[in-house]
Amino acid sequence: MSNFFIYLGMGLFSLVFLCLYRGVFGPGVLNRIAAISAIGTKTLVILLLMGFIYDRVEMFIDISMVYALLNFIGTITAAKYLEIKREV
Amino acid sequence: MIRLPVICYSFLVARYSNEYQETSNEQPATSNETMTQVTDDIIIRTVARILIPFIQLYALYVIMHGHHSPGGGFQGGVILGASFILYLITHGLEEAKIRMSEVKAGLFSSFGLLIYSGIGLLCLILGSNYLDYGKLSAILRVIPAQARSLGILGVEIGVGIAVMAVMFSIFFDISTGGILPEDEEGGQEGR
C-alpha cells in the first residue's frame, strides 16, 4: 500500500510542474494566481501522502492545515492587490 | 516552498510586462485606495470573521505543542500574525487599529523578547548557563526534566508573541507605506 502512495505522490509531483509552467508563462495575472493556488493544494495532498508513507499522519496533518491556511490568505491578499491596482 | 519565488516573479512580470499597458492606462489607481481599505465584499468579510477565531486557536495549539510535534514559537507566531493580517485586509485600517495598532505591536514584540530573555537570565541568576532550564526546578518545585519542558514552553510563548507582533508590524508598515492617517491630520491620537 505504501508503493501506491509513493506513485500517487510522484504523479502529483509531475502535475505540479504543469501548474508551474502556467504560473510562470501564463497569460495574465489571474492565471498565475490560480496556478499558485493549485500548486499549494497539490503540495497539501503530497504532504498528507508523505504522512501515510511514514505512518505519522497526525503529525503531517498539522503541517498541511497550516499550508492550506496560508494558501488561503495569500490568495486573498493577491486578489486584494489586484483589486487596488486594477490591471487585470 | 516554491510559492514565494513564484509569487514574486509573477508580480514582477505583471508589473513590467507590456501586454496590459493599454488597460492599465484606462483606469489608473487612485491614491486613496490602499491595501488596508475596507473590502465591500460581504462574503470575504463573513468568511474572515468566522475563520479568524479558529486560526488563532490553531496558532495557540501550534505554540503549545511545539516541543513534541512540528511547530513551535516561530510557526505559531506566524499563524497568529496571519490572522491579524487577514483581519487588517478584510476589515480595514480603522477597525483593525482597535484590535491591534502599531503601538500595541511594538509593545507586544518587546514583551515577547522580555519573556524570552527573562527566562534565560533567570537561569543565569540561578547559577547555570543561559537558557539552561534545569535549574528552574528550584523555583517551579518540579523535577528537572519537567522544568526543562516548562522552561522551553515559556520561551516558545515569548517567541510566539514577538513574532506575531513583528509580522503584523511589517505588514502594517508596508501596506500603509509608513504613513498613518492620523499622522497626516496632525497626530492627535495613538502616541
Image (cartoon, helix red, strand yellow):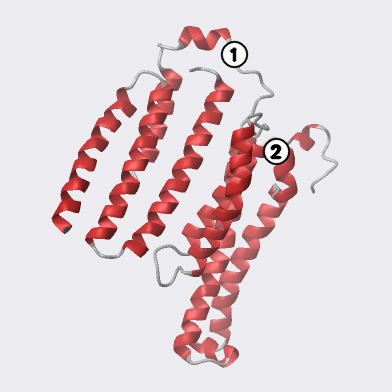
> The disc numbered 2 marks a residue on which chain?
B
Return the x and y of residue B51 as percentages of the image width and height.
57, 48
B173 versus B191 height, above or below: above
B31 versus A15 height, above or below: above
Return the x and y of residue B50 as percentages of the image width and height.
61, 47
Q: Tell which of A64 and B92 is nearer to you.
A: A64
Q: What whole-number distance in Å separates the C-alpha atoms at marks 2 and 1?
A: 23 Å
Return the x and y of residue B104 as percentages of the image width and height.
71, 54
Question: Please, which residue is most extreme toward the front here?
Answer: A1
Residue type highlighted by circle 1: Pro
B38 to the left or right of B167? right
Q: Residue at x 38, y 27 (%)?
A: A32
B60 versus B33 height, above or below: below
> The disc numbered 1 marks a residue on which chain?
B
Circle 2 sits on which residue?
A: B93
Determine if residue A45 is in view. yes
Label 1 neighbour load within 10 Å: few <14, some 14-19, many 20+: few
Question: Please, which residue is most extreme toward the left here?
Answer: A3
Residue type highlighted by circle 2: Leu
Q: Residue at x 41, y 33 (%)?
A: B8
Circle 1 sits on which residue?
A: B28
Return the x and y of residue A55 as percentages of the image width and height.
26, 65
First along the sequence among labels 2 and 1: 1
Q: Residue at x 51, y 41 (%)?
A: A73
Determine if residue B127 is in view. no
- The answer to whether tags 2 and 1 share a subunit is yes
Label 2 neighbour load within 10 Å: few <14, some 14-19, many 20+: many
Q: Secondary structure at mark 2?
A: helix
B36 to the left or right of B142? right
The number of numbered discs placed on residues in the rendered structure image is: 2
